[in-house]
Amino acid sequence: MILSWLIGILFAGGIGAWIAEKSNPELPRVIALATVLLDLFLVLLMLFAPGSLGLEPMSSADLGQPGEWLVLYSADWIPRFGVSFIFGVDGLGLLLVALTVFLGLMSLGSAWHEIKDRAGFFYFNLLWTLAGVIGVFTALDLFLFFFFWEVMLIPMYFIIAIWGHENKEYAAMKFFIFTQVSGMLMLLAILILVFFHYQDAGQISFSYFDLLGTPIPEAYGFWVMLGFFLAFATKLPAVPIHNWLPDAHSQAPTAGSVILAGILLKTGAYGLIRFAVPLFPAESMAFAPTAMLLGVISILYTAKVAFAQNDLKRLIAYTSVSHMGFVLLGIYAWTSQGVQGAVMTMLAHGFSAAALFMLAGGLQHRIHTRQMDQMGGLWSAAPKMGFMALFFTVAAIGMPGLGNFIGEFLVLLGSFRISPAAAALAAIGMVVAAVYSLIVIQKVFHGENKNNLVVQDLTKVEMICFGLMMIGLLWMGMYPQSMLDMSEPTLRSIGVIFFD
Amino acid sequence: MLYTSLIIDLMQIIMLTLGSVVVMVTAAFKRDHAVVCGLTVFSLFAALMTFVLIKPVLPFEATQLLMIDEYSLFFSNLIIIGAIGVALLAYPYFKTHNSQNEEFYILLMTATLGAVVLACSNHFVALLLGMEMMGVSLYAMIAYTIHDENAAKFPLEAGIKYLILSALASGITLFGIALLYAFTGTLGFDEIPAALEAAGETGPIFIMGVLMITAGAAFKLSLVPFHIWTPDVYEGAPVPVTAYLATVSKAAMIAATLRLLLASHALEFNAVVAVLTIMAAASMLLGNLLAVLQTNIRRLFAYSSIAHLGYLLVVVIAAASVDNALSVESTSFYMLAYFIMSLSGFAVISAISNSTGELDSLSDFRGLFWRNTWLSTVLITVLLSLAGIPLTAGFIGKFYIFSTGVEGELWLLLTILIIGSAIGLYYYLRLIYTMLQKSEVSGTDRAAAALPLGVNVVMVAMTLAIIFLGVYPTPMIGTLQSLAAAF
């Protein structure tokens, strides 16, 4: 029940914010903040004091499902199609839900002063996107999952299309069509899967647990798996279906970029871990070399492309694709370290990319350009900003002691066991990352301030946001075990290879 | 006893006939737009309500011609609801029209009567009667604003186009019926299989006949390659009539065609399935592709309706390889969803149009979201639903098509459906984006004015229906399952 509360609160808060706009233009953001804080409070309770909500880890005896589910809730929805509301959260899901709500708060922080125009509708869309994402991370009925998969899409479209920058129409359209078309392929794949389950078991069901282990005729298996893979790889994104991302990220308003990079990309990775591989273990193993190759290509190719960018947000967007290449590599290695590394990378990249987009957005808000050749020498004008940029940049390139390092190191370790060549090539990516990241610091904050830009330094709200994300990254880097312990039961139950 | 139940079963048709007469007589004595429109809505509503009486005595074969069962009742109700909606839209639209408006409602009644007969038909005579009754009324309705200089752009062109092509289609259908009769010696839909068995071998004459009848139906459904009239007529006719064409006329024709195809077992012939497959594929592709090029929202809706009927045809074709009941259920649901979406969409267009001036160019919608949030929210809901996005009826409809298609293993058609939907997304989104843009309005901004009550009623009802069916379709699915069980 608690999960439907999490989602319901966001839905209701969104509608409230929209309505409140009429009475007072300041009110929507306050309502949005209250909504997200309430959600965060519930999530923190679930994380640290599940007992107070009456929750205890269970192996869900009533549904007879494997895995340690903290919450598992099921109710009928459309019995005709065997569709039901199955919400569940285990360690992995809870980590991602926490990430979602936390970054939701960060995106509110970045929108706080930036969005003045039609704020009510903006916060409505923001909260509905968050609700959709939480739905994706907790839905365990494939119909419901698909439902939320689409629900998070439309508000995001509005955010880009209304509050975006100069080329927003193109970017929003591209984002929507890529995601929606790949989503339709997934819907088709889901239906084929359900159809084979129906032939096998004589009962229509969209439940994740029922569909696990469905025998699929050899001729179809690969294609059905591919339908899932394409949808998730588009969202992740992986080369060659990544090119919606630079446009969407660079055109979206700051809060939109934060959510896109921080959370939405993770839904793709989550989908691969939870659905694509466990539902089609054999097909995925056969496909793994290709997927790992795509991962390596993503890492290297987009790192190279990032280096060539002059637009700050575009550059960060390409680095996101590069980091997501590690996630893809780790997942398809399917070893404990590989997938654990992928999960850590997802969390850490969520923080670092969100922070970098907030910095880039903040800069654009102040000096009205994203072009790096217009900038320079900003460190002396805005030392706090410079420090934060440096911190999150070195975090992103994998400085030991911070979360990203743990993630990428584990991915390399895990994939080395499966394919030393892939791991070796991917490791080059970490070197290239240093090059393209440090050039940003060089161009933006060092050198001569050619245009005599006067930049207001970070405000209190921004400092609080960045401070929180710093703490998060440090925690991940120093005490990763706390998170690895949470995701381990999930990974064991879905059949990741553990060497112990 | 027999006559009582016969009368009860035919109650809707009788009420509609009575209604037409009453409206006609009233119009002859008291030329008052409001009175006639009110009377029309009232008699339609009375006809609709008789389903409560009819329901317990189903199914019933009312003479050889008509089959009254849950299926036909569902479609009849849909048709009458659509007609009520159109009457509500027509009142504010024609209020500014300076010639006589009362006859419009008589035509509306007779067209609706024809549509209901068509939906109940179980015999070629009823099929043709219904089709013609609806068609002849529609010719006049399409060209209704012909004497008004400021009216819709090309009512005469639209009327003539529809007249000629519709007459051609009827001719082809008649020829097809004749061929069928020559081969089987029967005109009843469900007597065909037995007659075929008796004849032994199936000759090309039979298949030819079925194909010609299908072509006639495809004209009314505006499937490629019989779609040429659609955009011109949609654009040229008064908005309420366009709404009628898009909803009532399609629903009635689909009801009759599906019953004919299933009852006559025509889908057992590969030639028929092949032709339908080609029509479906071409409609999905061409409809969506050409819609991209349109700058007029009514032409856009016209092409999008071609595409949607193509989607619908996929489930009809699926009846060849899956359970008939599933196919009927899916077809009915999709038709229902499409019906609601279209009516709602045309309600929005008619809200900012009247008989002296129509705002239907895409640029008229620029910035609508900021000028009239309610109106554009309705249109956005419709567009998202047409695109098949969750929380809307369109999504459940598309879901039905996908699941039926998968069960029928129609991989080619499903692939084309995905491609078509992707193109569809593009132009639906473009329209949504247009509404979200900021704009300065020049001249009078009709969209910001208060909306007529009738239009609001239609929009509220249809939007609620779209969302309700999208979120909780279970009750409707139950109804459809029970009506489909008879097939």
Image: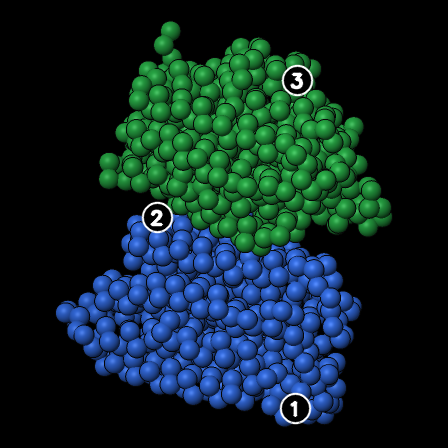
Residue holding disc 3: A471
* Tag in front: 3 or 2: 3
In the image, B164: left or right of A23?
left
- Identify the colour of chain B in the image: blue
Residue A56 vertical position relative to residue A13 in the rendered view, above or below:
above
Q: Position of residue B14 (x, y in %)?
A: 56, 77
Nearer to the camera, A241 or A380 = A380
User: Which residue is drawn at the image coordinates 40% and 50% (left, top)?
Assistant: B402
Q: Secondary structure at mark 2?
A: helix
Q: What chain is tagged by disc 1? A: B
Q: What is the basis of the colouring in this image?
A: by chain
- Residue A274 seen in the figure: no
Residue A192 vertical position relative to residue B453 in the rendered view, above or below:
above
The quarter of the picture where residue A350 lies is top right
* Tag in front: 2 or 1: 1
Q: Amino acid at mark 3?
A: Ile
- Identify the colour of chain A in the image: green
Residue holding disc 1: B149
Q: Amino acid at mark 1?
A: Glu
User: Which residue is drawn at the image coordinates 53% and 14% (left, top)?
Assistant: A400
Check residue B315 in the rendering and tell me which mark sits there, or answer none: none
In the image, A312: left or right of A177?
right
User: Which residue is drawn at the image coordinates 42% and 20% (left, top)?
Assistant: A411
Label 2 and label 1: CA atoms lie apart by 52 Å
